[in-house]
Each structure stands twice: as C-alpha cells, then as structure tokens.
Image: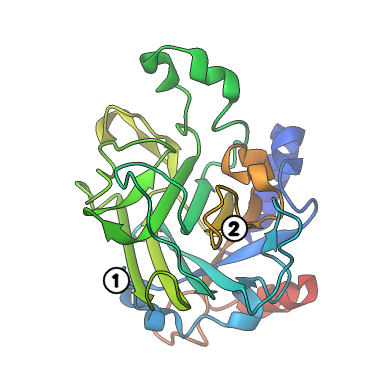
C-alpha cells in the first residue's frame, strides 16, 4: 500500500478538524516502526529483539527531551536521578501495537501496601487510543455514576496500562486505575492473544537499578468490560495515525508525593485525555533491514522525512 498515509491524512482533515488537531505536541508526528512477521519481538522483558530499530529515528527519551517531568517541577530532568527511553512498533499481520521501555532509576521504590490495586510505587504507564478518536478516557464527574454506568465510559475508547515491578503477592499489571478485569487480572493475562506484557528488573528496592518493559497491545476501537466478543478492534494499516503516550512514576522519598512523573507528551493528563497523546504514523517495513520483506519503494523518502522532523 504505497503512500496511503497521504490519503488517510486527507480523510482526517475532511472528516474532523477536531480529530486532526487533537494531539500533543501540536503539529508534530512521531513514527511507529513496523516489524515484519518473522521479527515480531517476544514479549519477555528482553529488549534485544528491538536492536534493529534505528534509535536515532524512533527513540522517545528523557535525553532527547521528549519525556519530561510534569508534576513536581522541582525534579528537573537529572539523568543521574532518572532516565528513560521508549520505542513504538506495530505489525500488520498480527494487528498489534508493540512498545518497549528502559528506565534507569537511582532509587527503586516498590513497597506498596495494597499490591492488588494501583498504588504509589514506581511504575510505567502505557496509554493508547488506536482509532485516533480522542476525548476523555477518565473524567472526575464519571466517578459519581453507578458502576455499570462507569463501565460504559472509563477507558473504553482509549486504554491505560500500568505496570509495577516486581510483582508483590503476584500483582503487577493493571488496566484502568483501580482493579482488575478480563484483560488482566493483575497477576496474569487470561487472553494473551489480546495483551502481553514482559518485564525485567535489576537492582533492589531502595537502591539503584533498571526497569525493562515490553507490551503487545490490541488496538481497541471500543473496549468493553464484558469481554472480547463485546469489544471491537481497529484494523491497523500502513499510513494510519494512532494516539500513544507514556508516563513514568518515580517515588524516592516516601513522602506521599511524586518525586517525578515523567511524561510523554509533556502534559500530565495524557493518562486521562486522549487529545493529549502524541500522533504516531504506522510505517511500512524497512526492506533494507529485512531483505525478505515486501515493502520497498517509500522507505527512503519516509526516513528522510523522519530525520527532518526530528
């Protein structure tokens, strides 16, 4: 499918000005690398599978100024205290979005008193709005509604995944901000065809270390609390633009406050409003990296455009 991104962009402009403009940073587009089917990464916390992804083109990081502390203000971006980098990818045949993150932290904090819920601990949050529809995923006034009404609204059109390492009492991976559901029980993934998360941690709580995360996420158009048969999935195609964001929570002092919320884009409410996520364009396979891949014509021009934008 050659140059379909232009047709898609035109459709967005014609169909919805709000959709076309609702992202952060305004006017900027990032890019999702496409793995060919024979190189899709294992979701096991070993990011060696990502080595062929050109970091100069695709990396989102603190060092490049993409990931910024947004809440405390006094945390700064001291790489000796906190550093992180991300990559985003996809695959047309699996119809899944992939991401990896490596987070170097001078003080690992993993001592939450209630491990069965989201809590105040170091964490990586991955947020995705795969149909690029934007809008609220969480609103304060929704909390006054009944539970069934809430479940028609919270994170149905965009998803928030939260990973706390290492597992405590087996709990470590959540969707939404409070509990478990069919996609993840907090301890395991009942439907791994729809969600996989891998991890690794080096170092001990209270000292320096490294967190490594990987995720394979389904591009939900509408996610339903009742299960996969009630949910609908976006058909990912080359040139399509989707919304994605990341947040890292850093707790060092145990004083009940963030010691840093390092967010991409650099707007903290990206976790609750899909209009604040970044635009990611889904690229073709880079045939120069994978000689057996099909796509050939447009990669050189796309790569030149990426480097120009960066």
How far apart are the two marked residues, 1 and 2, measured between alpha carbons? 28 Å
Q: Can residue 241 be spotted in the picture?
A: no
Residue 101, position as x, y percentages in the image: 49, 69
Instruction: Residue 18 in the image: state x and y as whole percent.
Output: 74, 34
Q: Foreground: 52 or 110?
A: 110
> Pointer 2: what residue?
239
Camera-nearest residue between 125 and 300 = 125
Q: Residue at x 37, y 17 (%)?
A: 147
User: Is residue 78 visible in the rendered structure shown here?
Assistant: yes
Q: Quadrant of residue 176?
A: top left
| Residue 280: image location, x then y, percent | 61, 57
5 displayed left or right of 145:
right
17 sits to left or right of 49: right
Q: Does 158 appear above or below 306?
A: above
> Circle 2 sits in a helix, a strand or a loop, which is it?
loop
Q: Nearer the viewer, mark 1 or mark 2?
A: 1
**Disc 1 element:** loop
Kindly identify the residue that appears in the image at 28 percent across and 46 percent down.
186
Residue at the image point whose x is 59% and y is 81% from the top = 55
Of callouts 1 and 2, the N-terminal one = 1
Residue 44 circle label: 1
Q: Residues within 10 Å of mark 2 (few under 14, many from 20)?
A: many
Local crowd at mark 1 within 10 Å, few (<14), some, or many (≥20)?
A: some
Q: Is residue 69 left or right of residue 167?
A: right
């Amino acid at each position: 499918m050659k140059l379909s991104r232009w047709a898609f962009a035109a459709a967005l402009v014609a169909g919805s000005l709000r959709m076309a403009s609702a992202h952060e940073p305004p006017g900027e587009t990032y890019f999702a690398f496409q793995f060919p089917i024979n190189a899709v990464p294992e979701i096991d916390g070993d990011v060696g599978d990502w080595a062929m992804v050109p970091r100069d083109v695709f990396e989102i990081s603190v060092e490049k100024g993409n990931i910024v502390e947004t809440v405390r203000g006094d945390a700064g971006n001291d790489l000796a205290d906190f550093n992180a980098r991300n990559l985003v990818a996809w695959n047309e045949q699996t119809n899944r979005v992939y991401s990896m993150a490596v987070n170097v932290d001078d003080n690992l904090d993993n001592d939450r008193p209630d491990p069965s819920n989201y809590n105040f601990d170091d964490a990586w949050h991955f947020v995705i709005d795969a149909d690029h529809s934007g809008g609220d995923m969480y609103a304060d006034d929704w909390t006054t509604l009944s539970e069934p009404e809430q479940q028609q609204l919270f994170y149905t059109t965009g998803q928030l995944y939260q990973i706390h390492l290492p597992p405590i009492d087996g709990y470590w991976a959540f969707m939404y901000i409070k509990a478990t559901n069919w996609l993840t029980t907090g301890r395991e993934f009942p439907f791994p065809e729809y969600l996989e998360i891998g991890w690794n941690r080096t170092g001990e709580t209270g000292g320096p270390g490294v967190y490594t995360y990987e995720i394979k996420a389904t591009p939900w158009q509408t996610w339903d609390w009742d299960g996969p048969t009630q949910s609908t999935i976006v058909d990912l195609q080359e040139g399509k633009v989707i919304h994605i964001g990341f947040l890292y929570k850093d707790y060092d002092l145990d004083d009940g406050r963030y010691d840093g919320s390092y967010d991409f884009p650099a707007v903290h409410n990206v976790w609750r409003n899909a209009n604040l996520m970044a635009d990611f364009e889904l690229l073709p396979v880079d045939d120069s990296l994978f000689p057996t891949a099909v796509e050939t014509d447009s990669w050189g021009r796309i790569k030149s455009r990426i480097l120009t934008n960066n």
